[in-house]
């Protein structure tokens, strides 16, 4: 027995998703699956854990000596929770030699992820529903534009496209950034006193993009007079940006360029990085990468990664009162009273479900009126009433909850009676031909 005063709550960083929120989440996931399938992007599922030794062997792309992974030492860290899908998909791409298959490999993942952060010297794990698209094996910027078009379409489908903002940044390639880093460091030499404390730290750590995007007034004045990264763009790089602008325009994708938008966490992205916002709140990012795993040029990969926190998307959908179509509306409620009626009612539930009729019933000890009230509450159109008399006479009493009219129906005719009143397209039943086609496809595969 729990002690007095026990506070029942999930572990810190974890949360419950209740039925009403599941309705919204299910709608969002259904739209995502449909649009990805339509675009030829196939689903992949990777383990919830990855081995640090595998993650450590993935690219150590650097700029300012920042690495992708920093796994704590100790035998207790033999496995790490995924904070996103990108690493696992890359690992799967290598493990299963997907580079030998037709390129690019267009993949998406949709499942729980676990972000970690330090709070008051304690490591806090936060659970969230993640969505990731990885298109690997091709550098064409047309694919970046197609991902952004796909997300804009999804936002339109779920009714929040007016909340969407896409911010993109021309972050250059490694060569351009290295040249830029040298000049920008020289520029700030002797100007440290004019910087805020955060920028002083960024200068020491060589986080130049963060330094140049500081909102403090004095720092902004210095940033405006600083050398520009575009100065070091090669002709190929300029062509890349021109092409992606043309592709986005052709696909009617709304976006805006933003100077020095850069991710310290994913410092390997080049030459494009972007962030996705809904109602001015960041919900995800997109990044283009080249020559990942460049230790061996023959095994290097290129592509783009699109990652979203769907928990934040669901919040916006709820705030905007997005209409969520609900196809699982219940057709019939079976109300019963008495032991024999209960037995008949239980059998009737499964009998009607076999016909595709969506039916529920309370098999507890509630009164008949309490059960009918439940049917009213959930706006169920028909209520089947079973009592001692109905059992003895082998009949049921069907009540139309909208009109209040009652109809006595023989038990052996109840299926036909209800099927005449429920639209065929609403029935929850697998078509026999579908099952036959699935079986035929399976045996042909053998």
Image (cartoon, grey):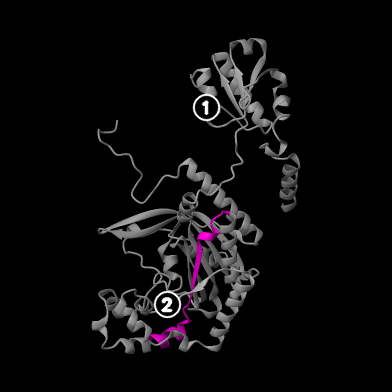
Q: Check disc 1 and report its element: helix, strand or loop.
A: helix
Q: Is residue 214 found left or right of 107 in the rendered image?
A: left
Q: Earlier in the sequence, mark 2 or mark 1?
A: 2
Check residue 441 in the rendering and tell me which mark sits there, or answer none: none
Residue 218, image x and y in percent?
Answer: 29, 79
Whether 429 is among the magenta residues is no
Along the viewing direction, whichever of 80 and 325 lies nearer the viewer: 325
- Badge 1: residue crowd in 10 Å (few <14, some 14–19, many ≥20): some
Q: Is residue 85 visible?
A: no
**Magenta residues (range):** 158-181
Asked if residue 355 lies left or right of residue 112, the reply is right
Query: Taking 210 as reference, is 174 left or right?
Result: right
Foreground pick, 386 / 438: 386
- CA distance for labels 2 and 1: 57 Å
Q: Quadrant of the N terminus?
A: top left
From this view, report whether residue 91 is shown above or below residue 366: below
* Image location of residue 284, percent across then percent down: 47, 63
**228 relative to 408, above or below:** below
Q: Which mark is residue 260?
A: 2
**Cβ atoms under marks 2 and 1 closer than 8 Å:** no
Report the residue at 73% width, 40% height from top.
431
Label 1 belongs to which residue?
374
Please identify the residue farthest to the left as the structure is shown: 193
Q: Position of residue 320 (x, y in %)?
A: 49, 51
Q: Is residue 222 left or right of residue 258?
A: left
Secondary structure under badge 2? loop
- Which residue is nearer to you in this view: 217 or 250? 217
User: Which x, y percent locates residue 304?
Assistant: 54, 70
Query: Badge 2: few (under 14), some or many (20 or more) residues near its Cα, within 10 Å?
Result: many
Q: Residue furthest front?
A: 403
Residue drawn at the location 52% of the way across and 24% of the way down: 373
Residue 178: in magenta span? yes
């Amino acid at each position: 027995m729990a002690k007095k005063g026990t506070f029942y709550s999930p572990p810190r960083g974890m949360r419950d998703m209740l039925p009403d929120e599941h309705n919204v989440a299910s709608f969002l996931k259904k739209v995502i699956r449909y649009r990805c399938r339509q675009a030829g992007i196939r689903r992949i599922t990777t383990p919830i854990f990855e081995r640090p030794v595998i993650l450590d062997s993935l690219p150590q792309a650097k700029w300012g000596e920042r690495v992708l992974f920093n796994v704590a030492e100790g035998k207790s860290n033999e496995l790490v929770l995924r904070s996103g899908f990108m690493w696992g998909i890359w690992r799967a791409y290598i493990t299963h030699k997907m580079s030998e298959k037709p390129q690019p490999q267009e993949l998406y993942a949709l499942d729980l992820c676990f972000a970690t952060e330090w709070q008051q010297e304690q490591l806090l794990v936060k659970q969230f529903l993640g969505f990731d698209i990885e298109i690997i094996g091709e550098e064409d910027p047309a694919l970046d534009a197609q991902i952004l078009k796909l997300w804009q379409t999804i936002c339109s489908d779920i009714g929040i496209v007016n909340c969407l903002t896409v911010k993109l940044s021309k972050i250059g390639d490694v060569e351009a950034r290295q040249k830029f880093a040298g000049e920008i460091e020289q520029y700030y030499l002797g100007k440290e006193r004019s910087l805020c404390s955060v920028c002083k730290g960024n200068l020491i750590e060589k986080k130049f993009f963060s330094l140049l995007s500081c909102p403090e007034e004095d720092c902004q004045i210095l940033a405006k007079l600083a050398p520009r990264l575009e100065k070091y763009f090669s002709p190929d790089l300029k062509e890349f940006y021109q092409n992606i602008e043309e592709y986005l325009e052709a696909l009617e994708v709304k976006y805006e360029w933003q100077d020095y938008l850069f991710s310290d966490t994913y410092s390997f992205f080049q030459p494009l990085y972007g962030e996705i916002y809904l109602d001015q709140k960041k919900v995800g990012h997109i990044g283009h990468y080249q020559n990942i795993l460049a230790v061996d040029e023959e095994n290097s990969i290129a592509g783009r990664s699109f990652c979203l926190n769907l928990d934040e998307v669901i919040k916006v959908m709820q705030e905007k009162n997005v209409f969520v179509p609900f196809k699982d509306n219940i057709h019939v409620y079976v109300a019963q009273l008495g032991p024999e009626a209960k037995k008949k009612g239980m059998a009737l539930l499964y009998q009607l479900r076999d016909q595709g009729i969506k039916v529920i019933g309370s098999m507890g000890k509630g009164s008949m009126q309490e059960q009918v009230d439940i049917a009213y509450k959930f706006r169920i159109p028909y209520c089947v009433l079973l009592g001692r008399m109905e059992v003895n006479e082998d009949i049921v009493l069907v009540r139309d909850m909208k009109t209040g009219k009652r109809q006595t129906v023989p038990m052996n005719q109840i299926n036909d009676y209800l099927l005449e009143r429920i639209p065929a397209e609403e029935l929850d039943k697998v078509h026999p031909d579908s099952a036959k086609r699935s079986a035929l496809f399976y045996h042909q595969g053998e």
